[in-house]
Amino acid sequence: MPAVLAFPSIRRSNANSSSPGTKGLNDYAKAIGKTYFGTASNIPGAETSDSAYMTILNDNGQFGQLTPTYSMKYSFTEPSRNIFTYTDGDAILTIAKGNSQLVRCHNLVWYDSLPSWLTSQTWDNATLISIMTNHIKTVVTHWGSGCYAWDVVNEALSDDGTYRPSLWYNTIGPAYIPIAFAAAAAAAPANVKLYYNDYNVEFPGTKASAAQKIISELKARGIRIDGIGLQSHFVAGQTPSQASQEQNMAAFAALGVDVAITELDIRIPLPATSASEAQQKTDFESTVGACVKTQRCVGVTLWDFDDKYSWLVNGEPGYGNGDPWDANLQKKSAYDGIVAALSGTNSTAS
């Protein structure tokens, strides 16, 4: 079980609400039958000592689900071969448990964030399969039902729909994906959802079709997969239309899996203008609106809720401010766009 850590917990507050007593994003989402509205967070990073940030994060009226941005990735959980560390990942589960929040655990198998012991040498097929499945079994078993869901395989596809070159693919071949899901299914409690997660699969096209093929092939082989994670790192003004996103979500749902928006942010050119912020609001409204209109879309996760700690601070030169709260932890008009979608006043619906 995760160690109990001394982090502040607030089961419900109206921190930074538009007015006292107003509902938060998770309140709106659950009122229309969604499982959660959530956010990622780099706990236990600098955010942990920022009381204003933590007050918002701990508000389960705003966020009913948390995702660790880094602390459960391979290099953090198995920094040396067969030596596992869980302290950082335990931290976010402790917070979530205190706030009655779900946790989307992220991730088990990715081409990036791999420890040097794994990437600095060449492995044969059988050995690398053993390393991968041992990692999956050990980590999934440790956190057990503390995870609402796992992103089992992350970003296995290139934008043209072919398999992305990686340590896993280059050594094991495409079989690493069903092997990973089978290992996760064997280790995970039945109530823990297993997802494939990727970007540029949020609209119909070659890459989305390739992701659908992965799901179909897993199901044809009797290997459990429960959902598709649509990352949704968008640019304001270039975000897929609501109609396009709804069509795409329907195509995944038709395969018998849940759909989730897992890493939502919508960046704008810097410096921000009133026009770019208005477009951002519209794009948040249409993206969340697509989930609202899709029965099997279970929820939305922001890739951190604020511009202060967002990966976009250093991630996309010339762009940023991609979140509903600004760098001073104040709500932006983008927040109002999300509320409009969740409350049924969506002006962008097709």
Image (spheres, rainbow, N blue to C red):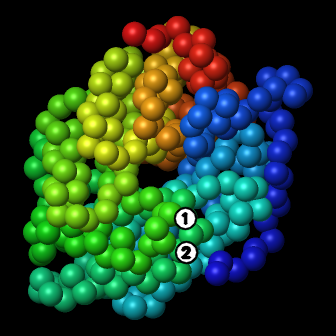
**Picture quadrant of residue 177:** bottom left
Where does the image place residue 62, in percent across and percent down from the top left?
71, 39
Q: Is residue 193 left or right of residue 163?
A: right
In the depicted view, which residue is nearer to us: 227 or 255?
255
Query: At 45% across and 37% down in the image, what residue appears?
Result: 297
Q: Are marks 2 and 1 in contact (CB under 8 Å)?
A: yes
* Residue 143 visible (yes or no): yes
The CA distance from mark 2 to mark 1 is: 6 Å
Q: Residues within 10 Å of mark 1 (few under 14, many from 20)?
A: many
Amino acid beneath label 2: Trp
Q: Is residue 213 above or below residue 264?
A: below
Q: Is residue 85 above or below residue 295?
A: below
Q: Is residue 129 left or right of residue 84?
A: left
Amino acid beneath label 1: Cys
- Judged from the image, the secondary structure of the residue bearing numbered disc 1 is loop
| Residue marked by disc 1 | 147
In the depicted view, which residue is nearer to us: 210 or 292?
292
Where does the image place residue 87, in percent across and percent down from the top left?
61, 78
Q: Residue furthest right?
A: 20
| Residue marked by disc 2 | 143
Where does the image place residue 183, in percent across and percent down from the top left?
31, 76
**Picture quadrant of residue 240:** top left
